[in-house]
Image: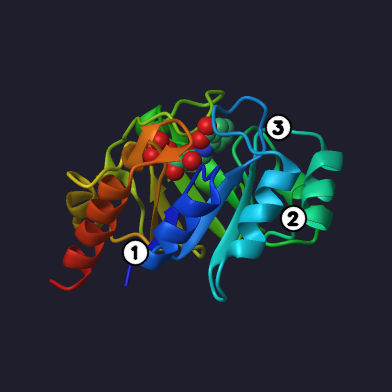
Amino acid sequence: MTRIKCCGMTRIGDALLAVRLGADAIGLVFSARSKRQVTLAQARGIVVALPPFVATVALFMDDEASLVRQVLDEVRPMLLQFHGDESDGWCAQFGHPFLKAIAMGEGAAALPRLRDYPHATGLLLDGHAAGEAGGSGKAFDWSLLPGGLAQPLILAGGLHAGNVGDAVRTARPWAVDVASGVESAPGIKDPARLKAFIRAVRTVDAE
Ligand SMILES: O=C(O)c1ccccc1NCC(=O)[C@H](O)[C@H](O)COP(=O)(O)O
């Protein structure tokens, strides 16, 4: 079964709805570069409202280590996710499981970077170009997802209910990740789009 992460949550109601519809994980963005940035208090409110067995992921992009530590202390996410130029060693310094996002905007030229993060729990391949923030709604060529990597791959970038079925069929990722494709505005999830997205993934899983 393909895991589903809904990213860029800013409201408790949206997170609870996503989980009720079948999302496995929710993402909270702490980067000041994001239109979906949450405060520590907002994030903590969402995390404590969730039912058991839902993964919580805290996102950063070239942020200070002190912010990451503060989020770990006060929000207690299950996973960290790094979107910038952070090195494997920098990401691993917190002793906490992490995902590393790889910007796939350059296509195959980005593939060597998949080998640079041996400490990552998983690699999230996103459609934006290196240096750009995530949540851009940009897709990349899913057939580039390589097999044979040690880590699970999470497919992101420009996914929505209309294309996620093809994406899963093509790439067979461990998980898919969506932000703008289930929104009516940045950080505001749209119930109908959320429902259609999760249904589309589950339909392919059942084929
Ligand atoms: O969402 C943001 O604004 C953001 C800003 C800075 C770093 C990461 C960010 N988001 C990460 C994500 O949500 C993923 O990239 C996302 O699943 C893909 O976004 P989308 O293409 O909009 O589905």
Is there any visible trace of residue 98 in the rendered image?
no
Q: Position of residue 38 (x, y in %)?
A: 64, 38
Task: Check the image and name the residue furthest to the left.
Answer: 207
SS type, badge 3: loop
Residue in view at x 48 percent, y 36 percent: 187
**Could you say which disc has been placed on residue 141 in the image?**
none
Q: Which residue is mark 3?
A: 62
Quadrant of the drawing holding the N terminus: bottom left
Marked residue nearer the N-terminal end (3 or 1): 1
Mark 1 nearby-residue class (10 Å; few <14, some 14–19, many ≥20): some
Q: Amino acid at mark 3?
A: Asp
Tag 1 or tag 2, which sits nearer the N-term? 1
C-alpha span from label 3 to label 1: 32 Å
The residue where tag 2 is placed is: 75
Tell me if residue 155 comes above or below residue 112 in the rendering: below
Mark 3 vs 2, N-terminal side: 3
